[in-house]
Image (cartoon, rainbow, N blue to C red):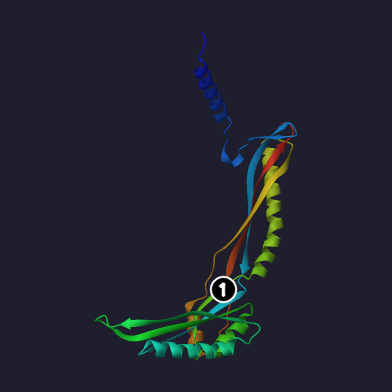
Amino acid sequence: MYLSEQKRKWLSVAVFVAAANLLVLPAQAQCVAAQTAGQSWPQASLGSEVSAQVLQDTVKITLASELDGASQAEVADQLSKTLESVMHDVKGDAKVKASSGNFRVWPVNDEHGKISNWHGRGEIFLESTDLAAASALAAKVSDRMPIGNLAFSVSPKARAKQQQLMLAQAAQVFRERAKALTEALGFASYSIRNIELGGVATHFQPVSRMMTMSASKTGAAAPLEGGTETVTVSMHGSIFLHSARK
C-alpha cells in the first residue's frame, strides 16, 4: 500500500513531535543536546544565592516648613524667605549635602466651598553618611524648619564593597552545586556554559516616628541610628556535563 505525499508529510511531523516530547525533563535538571566539537553534551541549568545584613550608613533628612496666610502671594513670599534663610545656613557644611525639595501653595476651602485661606509647604533635604553631622545641622535650623521625615539607606560605596565580598561566596556555592549535580547525574566532570549575575536589596527598616517628633520639638541633635538591609547576590547559569556515565 502506497501513502500519498501529503500523508507521508503528516506522518513525519507526528513522529518528530512524539520524539521531541520524550526528551522533556524536569525543570531543575533539564538537559538538552549541545553540539560542541562534534560531540553531544547534555546541558543543565542551576543557580546560587547568598545574602548578608548590611548596616544603613546614609541618612536623608527632610526639613519641612508649613504656614497659613490670607493670600497666595503672602504665603509664597514668607515660605520662600524661610527656605532661603535655612538653605543659607545648611549648604556650607562639607559633610552634608543640602538640596531643595517640594514647594507648594494651595487654597483651603471652607464648608461652603469658598477659599478661606492659603496653605504652603516647603522642603529642604539633608543627606549624609555622617549621621551625627546631619543630625546636628538639622537641629540647628529646627526652629524654622523642623524635621518632617527621616530615611536611611546603604551608600553605593558600602553596597559595592559588600557585593564584591558576596560574589566570591556565590561563585563557591555555584561550583559546589554544579559538582553535586554532575555526580548525581552520573557524569565525570562539567564546564560552565554561561553565567548571569543579579542582586537586590530588601528589608528596609525605617526610623521610628517618635525619634522624628522628639528632634523636632526639642531642637536638640537627636542620635541617629540606621536599620539594616538584606543585600542579595545571585548567580544563575548553565553547565555542560562531560564524559561517559560512570
Query: In this rendering, does residue 186 appear at all?
Result: no
245 is higher (above) or lower (below) than 133: above
Q: Nearer the viewer, residue 110 or 143?
A: 110
Density class for disc 1 (Cα within 10 Å; few <14, some 14-19, many ≥20) is many
Q: Position of residue 207 (x, y in %)?
A: 52, 75
Q: Position of residue 175 (x, y in %)?
A: 71, 48
Specify the amino acid type for callout 1: Phe
Drawn side of residue 116 relative to residue 243, left or right: left
11 is higher (above) or lower (below) than 195: above
19 is higher (above) or lower (below) than 154: above
Q: Quadrant of residue 184?
A: top right
Q: Quadrant of residue 157?
A: bottom right
Query: In this rendering, does residue 164 appear at all?
Result: yes
Count of all numbered marks drawn on residues in the image: 1
Q: Position of residue 237 (x, y in %)?
A: 65, 47
| Residue plotted at (52% across, 24% down) | 14
Q: Position of residue 20 (x, y in %)?
A: 57, 29
Q: Residue under circle 1?
A: 152
